[in-house]
Image (cartoon, rainbow, N blue to C red):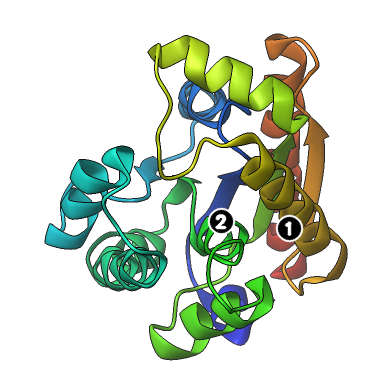
Amino acid sequence: MTNEGMTRKGFLFVLEGIDGSGKTTVCDIVEKLLLKDGYDVARLREPTGESQWGLEIRERSPLGELSPEEELELFIRDREWHVANRIAPFLQAGKVVLLDRYFFATGAYQSTVTPYHWSEILKRNREEIHAPDPDLLIILDVPAELGLERATGRKGSANLQFEKLDRLIKVRQNYLEMADSDSTPSVVIDATAPLEEVVGLVHEAVKGAIRKRDALTL
């Protein structure tokens, strides 16, 4: 964890996973549980629906209109805005920030279609736009075939930019490599388990990380 991570007032938790892993559903439920626990929660997602770059991703990506390099730059610019205007202020205000996708997703996905290894993309986010590391990275893991089935079945169509089986197989492997070798504290949760079980594991992981850091500051 960075020095910034040790001194900031709030907590940052990131949920990641391939399309169809259940991140958004789990975020919704865990947010409600944390609010019930008495925490001041800020729920965020990326790409944002607020910055001009996030809006462009959301409009053009599903149609497959963006080149890999264009997409990478848009994600980084959107995140730069997000860190400055939402993430950093919420952390300074002492909130528990629950974030659905972050720069780990950019590394996992964009490294499959650009010349850059996922570690290079993570490094760029950390050094170029000073994106803060989370207190815990939570990866919801499902086989690519199941993720694709869930994602396309839910919407009735595929996101032409992301939802291709061979790409999701590589993305899943990237996430597992991050959990194994990146510096950020992480946990991999089997998201093929029943939703209630997955939610319980995420909820406990978040509370455990909060308790652990609070104990270090006593």
Q: Residue 20's x, y, as percent?
A: 58, 26
The C terminus: image quadrant: bottom right
Instruction: Please identify the residue farthest to the bottom as the structure is shown.
Output: 127
Residue type at mark 2? Answer: Tyr
**Pointers 1 and 2 in contact (C-beta within 8 Å):** yes
* Residue 40, numbered circle: none
Which residue occupies the foreground of this view, 202 or 19?
19
Numbered disc 1: secondary structure: helix
Residue at point 61%, 61% (across, down):
112
The N terminus: image quadrant: bottom right
Instruction: Please identify the residue farthest to the left as the structure is shown.
Output: 52
Q: Residues within 10 Å of mark 1 (few under 14, many from 20)?
A: many
Numbered disc 2: secondary structure: helix
Question: Can you see residue 111?
Answer: yes
- State the image quarter where residue 80 is shown: bottom left
Residue at point 60%, 45% (across, down):
16
Disc 1 target residue = 174
28 in relation to 114, above or below: above
Disc 2 target residue = 109
